[in-house]
Each structure stands twice: as structure tokens, then as C-alpha cells.
């Protein structure tokens, strides 16, 4: 395909999959059950944190998180103490109750003097979303935690593609008009966003010659985003729907 043909194809697929039907099988359905900003962003963050593995399993574990938080995420976080999680036995893959307790305490710390949005503030020296994720990670880790919990919060400084954090930022920042993402955060622009790089998006990006790097890391993400911005510099991450949908739903 020529560049124009590829752009037309991906524009069509992005439009096809960015539709409320997408919610039916995707973990983003869980924060869509809430209307309060803080509830949406808390549920979105926690669900994106456990978003690896089978999507059915992710949704099931997400449902358990909502039960633990008594369907009132922000109120639960504000009044949280570790005793509330003592008998939960929550486990999703390698994320367990010890990690969840740390996440609840860190969220409480973040909301005492700001919000999840302000925690993703610009980095003083590292530009763009990479710097914002690093800044957020530093803030999040201020709360006392076990060493094991480090692995659940990706670090682009170590060349991680930070798939789950980039997915979360897409959810919070991109416009809500099509009924999938939320458009809640105005301090970031869609042009800043990076695509959540997973097996579907990376494999299809390589098939379409948008990505040559073999590893799914931050360097690969930089390469892919450069090419996607050539197609749409304002909202390049809309192509997440195209690249993911082609793999997840069409076995492209």
C-alpha cells in the first residue's frame, strides 16, 4: 500500500472499532459504570494496572476490585486503611493483596494534596508523556511499599513501553464523543499520547511496515508513534483502535 492508502485503511478501521460496541469485551467497560470523575479515574487506573492476560479474566478481577471498594471508589480511597483489605485475598496473575494495599494507600496519598491528573504533571527535564509517566511513578512510589510492587508500575526510563499506563492515559485524555474514552483530563493533549503497545498492535504495525524494531519496548513505541503522527499529528493514538482491532477481532 502507498502511504495514502495505508492512512485511509487505518482511518477506516479506527472509525470502525472506536464504537460503544468496543466496551462489550474490553476492561474499559468497568470505569464506564461510574459518572463521578474521581471514581472513573480510580477505577480506570486500577483496571489498567491489572490489564494483562485474558480480557475476560481482567474484567472478572476488575469486578472483584469494585466489590472490595464497595462500588464507591473515591469514598473508599479517602477513608482507606490496611485493615479493610486484611481478608480480601485478591490475586490477579502476580498482582496480589500486598500490592493492592500499596496501591490503595498511594492513591490516598495522591488525593490528599491533588489528583491522579495532577500526579501526571510535566517532568522538569524529560519532555512529553515519557516524562509525565516518570513523574507519576516517582510520586506514586513515595508511599511505603514492598520491593515486589515496583514491577507493576512500568518505567520508561528502563525502556519499558509502559503499555498499561499509556492505555490509561488514552482512556482519560481522548475525547468521549464516540463513547469509548472519557476525555476527562484537559492538562494533556491528544497529540502527546503514546499508544499502548501490545502483541496485537506491535505485530500488526510490523505487518504494515509501521514498525521495524523487533522488541516491544519504548524505542519501538517511539518509532511507531513517529509514523502514526505522520498520519494524524493531532490524535495519533486513535490508530490504537485500528491496530488492536485488526488483531483482536479480525486475526489480521
Image (cartoon, rainbow, N blue to C red):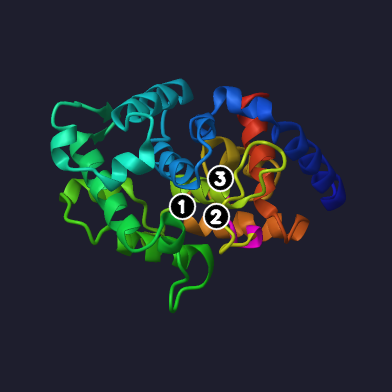
Label 3, secondary structure: give it: helix
Ranked by sequence position, the earlier of labels 3 and 1 is: 1
> Is 84 placed left or right of 191 in the picture?
left
| Residue identified by numbered label 1 | 161
Mark 3: few/some/many CA within 10 Å (<14, 14-19, 20+): many
| Residue identified by numbered label 2 | 221
Which mark is on residue 93?
none
Residue at 56%, 64% in the rendered image: 187
Mark 2: few/some/many CA within 10 Å (<14, 14-19, 20+): many
Residue at 61%, 49% in the rendered image: 183
**Residue 206 in which image quadrant:** top right
* The C terminus: image quadrant: top right
Ranked by sequence position, the earlier of labels 1 and 2 is: 1
| Residue identified by numbered label 3 | 171
**113 to 180, vertically: above or below:** below
Which is in the foreground here, disc 2 or disc 3? 3
Is 194 magenta? The answer is yes
Q: CA distance from mark 1 to mark 2?
A: 6 Å
Decide: marks 1, 2 in contact (CB < 8 A)? yes
Return the x and y of residue 34 as percentages of the image width and height.
50, 35
Label 1, secondary structure: give it: loop
* The N terminus: image quadrant: top right
Return the x and y of residue 210 as percentages of the image width and height.
68, 50
> Is 7 placed left or right of 121 in the picture?
right
**57 to 47, vertically: above or below:** above
Q: CA distance from mark 3 to mark 1?
A: 17 Å
Q: CA distance from mark 2 to mark 3?
A: 18 Å
Q: In the image, which residues are magenta?
A: 190-196
Residue at 44%, 78% in the rendered image: 125
Amino acid at each position: 500500500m502507498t502511504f495514502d492508502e495505508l492512512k485511509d485503511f487505518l482511518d477506516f478501521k479506527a472509525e470502525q472499532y472506536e464504537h460503544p460496541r468496543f466496551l462489550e469485551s474490553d476492561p474499559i467497560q468497568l470505569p464506564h459504570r461510574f459518572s463521578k470523575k474521581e471514581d472513573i479515574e480510580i477505577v480506570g487506573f486500577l483496571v489498567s494496572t491489572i490489564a494483562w492476560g485474558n480480557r475476560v479474566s481482567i474484567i472478572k478481577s476488575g469486578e472483584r476490585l469494585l466489590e472490595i471498594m464497595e462500588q464507591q471508589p473515591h469514598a473508599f480511597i479517602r477513608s482507606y486503611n490496611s485493615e479493610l483489605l486484611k481478608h480480601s485475598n485478591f490475586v490477579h496473575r502476580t498482582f496480589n493483596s500486598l500490592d493492592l494495599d500499596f496501591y490503595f494507600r498511594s492513591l490516598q496519598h495522591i488525593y490528599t494534596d491533588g489528583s491522579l491528573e495532577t500526579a501526571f504533571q510535566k517532568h522538569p527535564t524529560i519532555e512529553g508523556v515519557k516524562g509525565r509517566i516518570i513523574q507519576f511513578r516517582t510520586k506514586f512510589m513515595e508511599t511505603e511499599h514492598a520491593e515486589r510492587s515496583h514491577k507493576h508500575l512500568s518505567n520508561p526510563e528502563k525502556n519499558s513501553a509502559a503499555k498499561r499506563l499509556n492505555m490509561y492515559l488514552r482512556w482519560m485524555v481522548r475525547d468521549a464523543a464516540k463513547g469509548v474514552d472519557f476525555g476527562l483530563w484537559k492538562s494533556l493533549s491528544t497529540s502527546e499520547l503514546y499508544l499502548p503497545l501490545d502483541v496485537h498492535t506491535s505485530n500488526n504495525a510490523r505487518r504494515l511496515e509501521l514498525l521495524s524494531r523487533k522488541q516491544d519496548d519504548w524505542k519501538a513505541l517511539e518509532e511507531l508513534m513517529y509514523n502514526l503522527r505522520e498520519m494524524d499529528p493531532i490524535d495519533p493514538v486513535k490508530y490504537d483502535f485500528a491496530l488492536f482491532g485488526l488483531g483482536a477481532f479480525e486475526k489480521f
